[in-house]
Image: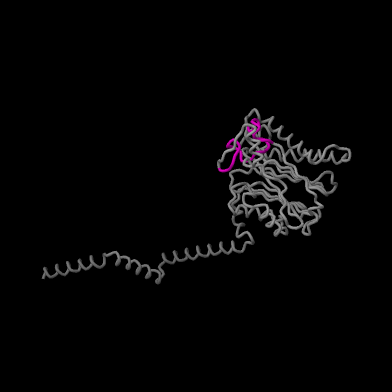
Amino acid sequence: MIEDTMTLLSLLGRIMRYFLLRPETLFLLCISLALWSYFFHTDEVKTIVKSSRDAVKMVKGKVAEIMQNDRLGGLDVLEAEFSKTWEFKSHNVAVYSIQGRRDHMEDRFEVLTDLANKTHPSIFGIFDGHGGEQNTLWQTILEAKTAAEYVKSRLPEALKQHLQDYEKDKENSVLSYQTILEQQILSIDREMLEKLTVSYDEAGTTCLIALLSDKDLTVANVGDSRGVLCDKDGNAIPLSHDHKPYQLKERKRIKRAGGFISFNGSWRVQGILAMSRSLGDYPLKNLNVVIPDPDILTFDLDKLQPEFMILASDGLWDAFSNEEAVRFIKERLDEPHFGAKSIVLQSFYRGCPDNITVMVVKFRNSSKTEEQ
């Protein structure tokens, strides 16, 4: 009897090992237990199911929020993550500026207008600094965080004063908007270098300045900030040309000065600076491989009958061509910032790693603009 019992137990053990302990059997057992738990709604399963449903609702809500945002495809969601933003709106000009993916904000802009008395042309400026945000020398010597801040705080006001003097005796003056622009830009560069030579400071900035009078638009550029205008036919008219080391004219000048350009992510003067002209940037100025000389162009407004112009730091132009930017803004002139905010956010969305600052100026002959 005992022997029969042992035989039976041995047989059951073999059956259990053969069937119940096989991986397939254990997997099916787990599935069965899970289904049983789900259909009988144990407290644990209820909690899991509720959490899953909440998560699905949250994701659906975010997707709906993104899809409901207008042309930008949900970029308003990203805007909350920007570390710094600036905006400006007055009459016919709007500016939107973001720090973006950079650790520091070195873009600056300025708008000086006199719509009432017309004592001087309207002054619009974009300044894109580099290498100065963390340099305490800018704060102690120049009382500014960056080279761009220094130029922004001094150059437009100096221009305003000289332009007012010029307008008082315009008929007898030997000066012009072009000569005033050139003199003041070179003067501010000398001022910066004199103060920073002793410190061997390498910070600098671009400089894009536009003077808007009743009949003419005069634009001075140093560096790779850029301006573009939309004429009466919707064409993109360049207001400036970037100063890049790889350009034939700039490359020859750098070589004549004894310098060189090399590729380090982009073509750079002495392997350092990604532009061939700037304000500041000692010691490259001392080597004469980087210069502050502006290119200055004048445009006849009666001939062009422009609708608007765009002035922007190179963060925009890393993501948009002149033609793309003009088309983009033209479709959005009715927006509160004349499309400036939209194109900045779109540039960010396209992956621009730089600070981005865009200024849009609408002209009086535009059917959509307010009286300048």
Where is residue 127? Give x, y as percent: 69, 43
Magenta range is 265-291
Residue 112 visible in the current orientation:
no
Residue 87 drawn at (x, y percent): 69, 50
The spot of residue 200 in percent (x, y) is: 62, 30
Does 198 sit above or below residue 14?
A: above
Quarter of image, res 334: bottom right
Residue 241 point in image, percent of width and height: 69, 45
Q: Residue furthest top?
A: 198
Near-viewer residue (136 or 150): 150
Identify the residue shown where x is 54% and y is 64%: 60
- Image point (86%, 37%), residue name: 173
Of residues 205 and 317, the one nearer the viewer is: 317
| Residue 271 falls within the magenta-colored stretch | yes
Decide whether residue 86 is among the magenta residues. Answer: no
Residue 306 in sight here: yes
* Image vertical order of residue 23 relative to residue 280, above or below: below
Vertical order, 9 against 84 (above or below):
below
Left or right of 128: which side holds 8?
Answer: left
Mainly helix, strand or loop, the magenta region? Answer: loop
Coloring applied to the structure:
one colour
Q: How many marks on residues?
A: 0
Quadrant holding the N terminus: bottom left
Q: Is residue 250 left or right of residue 120?
A: left
Of residues 169 and 8, the one drawn nearer to the viewer in this rendering: 169
Location of residue 123 (image quadrant): top right
